[in-house]
Image (cartoon, rainbow, N blue to C red):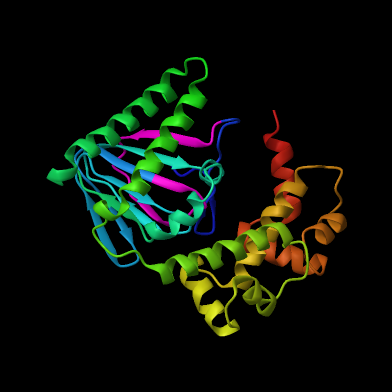
Amino acid sequence: MIEDFDGLREVVHFEKDLLLRIYRNCEAEDYPRHWHTDIELIMPLKAGYTVLIDSREFVLAEGDILLIPPGVIHSLKAPENGERYIIQVSCALANQMHGFYEELRHFYPCLHVRAVTARLEETCAAFQQLLHIMYDEYIHRAPFFNYMIAARCTQLLVELARNRKAFSTHESDRRYAKSVDGFLRVCDYIHNHCHEKLDVEMLSNVAGYSKSHFVRMFKEFADVSCVDYIQQQRVALAKQLLMDPENSIMDIVARSGFGSVASFNRVFKQLTDVTPTQFRKSLRQNKP
């Protein structure tokens, strides 16, 4: 199900004009620790499902719904047999609802809606029905299906926010939310400025933390140092530039933020197991 990894970050590719992806997943496959900039919704249909966030285990029963906010590092553990909806919602959709992104702070590290909560049974059934409608629209793709899905997803997110306190089985962690916010802000900055000169002190200011705290926080969230993450982003940019045969190696070195050809070759080989020249050659060989 995970198509593209960038370190621990899962890069979700959405279809044009469709700000979410829906899977009816029946794989008996575990997914390693990862995070993404999108909202994730999980609802088991048959058998349970287990989600690990930090050292805490959330065991989902059939009909439960788990909302995982952006930036939360989690792993997924599947039973040998089972089925579940896994929905990834772009934050661009949430941003269309004024103030909702701020509301997400109250959901950290996650929101677990238990289907067996008797006094909320009717509300849970309504949530489940919304997910079924979204999946049906996603599969059959009748005219304007993307608008229908976006409308139903918006309705679901609003209802979850309205009933958050009733559903919560634990206190929201505001400090965790603040740390995630700083981490995502820095990741976004690195992604957009990796071709420039970057240093840890400057990035700690972007995050709003002291240098020492920032170094610890970044390693905790990304599982790599900030310096290594910058190099990963530069190599990712270099790969894109290498796809254009008109770009010379010297030009790519300059445009991807490496100080020299020697440094570029060394880091690229270290992270991809091939040299830039070998990578470009493989692109030509695989070209139809």
- Residues 68 and 286: in front is 68
Asked if 102 appears above or below 133 in the picture, the reply is below
Asked if 165 appears above or below 281 in the picture, the reply is below
Q: Quadrant of the N terminus?
A: top left
Q: Name the residue at 57% across, 32% down.
A: 15
Q: How many marks?
A: 0
Q: Name the residue at 60% across, 75% down.
A: 208
Residue 212, x across and y down, in percent? 56, 84
Q: Is residue 58 left or right of residue 15?
A: left
Q: Is residue 175 left or right of residue 262?
A: left
Residue 149 in magenta stretch: no
Residue 166, x across and y down, in percent? 25, 52
- Residues 109 and 52: in front is 109
* Extreme residue in the top direction: 143
> Which of the 4 image quadrants contains residue 158?
top left
Q: Quadrant of the C terminus?
A: top right
Q: Name the residue at 47% across, 15% down.
A: 142
Q: Does residue 13 appear in the picture of this structure? A: yes
Residue 110, x across and y down, in percent? 35, 56
- Residues 57 and 258: in front is 57
> Which of the 4 image quadrants contains residue 119?
top left
Residue 24 in magenta stretch: yes
Q: Does residue 269 appear in the picture of this structure? A: no
Residue 62, x across and y down, in percent? 20, 40
Q: Name the residue at 40% across, 36% down.
A: 155
- Residues 150 and 68: in front is 150
The stretch in magenta equals: 18-40
Asked if 130 appears above or below 237 in the picture, the reply is above
